Image (cartoon, grey):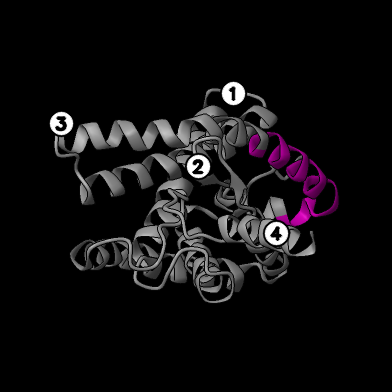
């Protein structure tokens, strides 16, 4: 009887830890061909350099914003480390990059995103070193660019602050996964239908879990932004997020 239970437990553990192919947003180590790793890394470099100079200028002019920058990085690190199983057998997670993009601009998040992805690849086995350029391009560059542009467009249209923050965070999250889908489709076109057929498959996998996650991240970011506005109003005015008269 005892031996039978041990066998059952062994089988359960074996199936739990069997390696499975997943389509997590962070493309895993060794998954992309070398040519694509180099290409995405080369495309990410100019944005990272621009972000480095942007951060140095902002912190130099407004040293008190350094704490906010650290908080934006911690926010993105924690959210993007929360891998949630998907009904499709893949995994999804929020990105947290929209918050930092609103405060410090899109290129600053290229630097923050690179640091986060590097730590996650080394410490959490989430993503990889060879795919660092591709993951930085999706989460640290495209996501923040979409988030920043969305925030500016809504504000220019005189939309309320909460709506601008919500849409920026949600769309920044969503387009990170759209970019990952494009990267995977380009590297692994389907035998029938090519890149477009492969892109449709990857977008379908991510859409089931990422749309509700993007909405949740938008709501969470609105709450965090409201709290920051109460306790760090002067720093937000220095960053021109709030007007001096508020």
Q: What residue is shown with label 2?
A: 89
Label 3 element class? loop
Residue 164 at what x, y percent from top left?
A: 60, 31
Q: Main secondary structure of the magenta part?
A: helix
Tag 1–tag 4 contact (CB < 8 Å):
no
| Numbered range of the magenta stretch | 217-235
Work out whether 98 lies above or below 232.
above
**Mark 3 and mark 1: span between their CA atoms?**
43 Å
**Mark 1 or mark 4, earlier in chain:** 4
Label 2 element class? loop
Residue at the bottom extreme, as displayed: 122
Label 1 element class? loop
Residue 176 at what x, y percent from top left?
A: 44, 45
* Camera-side mark, 4 or 3: 4
**Mark 2 or mark 4, earlier in chain:** 4
Q: Residues within 10 Å of mark 2 (few under 14, many from 20)?
A: few
Residue 84 at what x, y percent from top left?
A: 62, 46
Q: Is residue 182 left or right of residue 105?
A: left
Residue 180 at what x, y percent from top left?
A: 37, 47
Q: What residue is shown with label 3?
A: 193
Is residue 114 in view?
Answer: yes
Q: What residue is shown with label 4?
A: 9
Q: What residue is shown with label 1?
A: 158
* Camera-side mark, 1 or 4: 4
Please report the residue visible at 52 percent of the width from the left and 42 percent of the height from the top. Answer: 173
* Camera-side mark, 3 or 1: 3
Q: Residues within 10 Å of mark 4 (few under 14, many from 20)?
A: few
């Amino acid at each position: 009887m005892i031996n039978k239970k041990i066998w059952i437990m062994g089988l359960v553990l074996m199936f739990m830890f069997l390696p499975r192919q997943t389509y997590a947003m962070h493309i895993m180590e060794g998954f992309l061909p070398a040519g694509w790793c180099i290409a995405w890394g080369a495309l990410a470099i100019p944005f990272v350099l621009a972000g480095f100079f942007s951060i140095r200028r902002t912190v130099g002019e407004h040293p008190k914003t350094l704490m906010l920058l650290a908080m934006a990085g911690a926010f993105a690190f924690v959210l993007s480390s929360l891998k949630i199983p998907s009904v499709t057998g893949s995994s999804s997670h929020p990105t947290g990059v929209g918050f930092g993009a609103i405060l410090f601009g899109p290129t600053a998040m290229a630097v923050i995103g690179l640091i986060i992805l590097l730590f996650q690849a080394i410490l959490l086995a989430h993503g990889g070193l060879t795919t660092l350029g591709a993951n930085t391009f999706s989460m640290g560059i495209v996501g923040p660019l979409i988030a920043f542009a969305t925030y500016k467009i809504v504000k220019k249209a005189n939309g309320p602050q909460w709506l601008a923050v919500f849409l920026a965070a949600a769309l920044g999250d969503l387009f990170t996964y759209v970019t990952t889908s494009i990267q995977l489709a380009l590297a692994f076109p389907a035998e029938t239908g090519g890149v477009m057929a492969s892109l449709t498959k990857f977008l379908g996998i991510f859409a089931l879990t990422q749309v509700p996650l993007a909405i949740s991240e938008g709501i969470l970011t609105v709450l965090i932004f409201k709290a920051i506005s109460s306790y760090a109003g002067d720093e937000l005015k220095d960053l021109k997020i709030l007007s001096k008269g508020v």
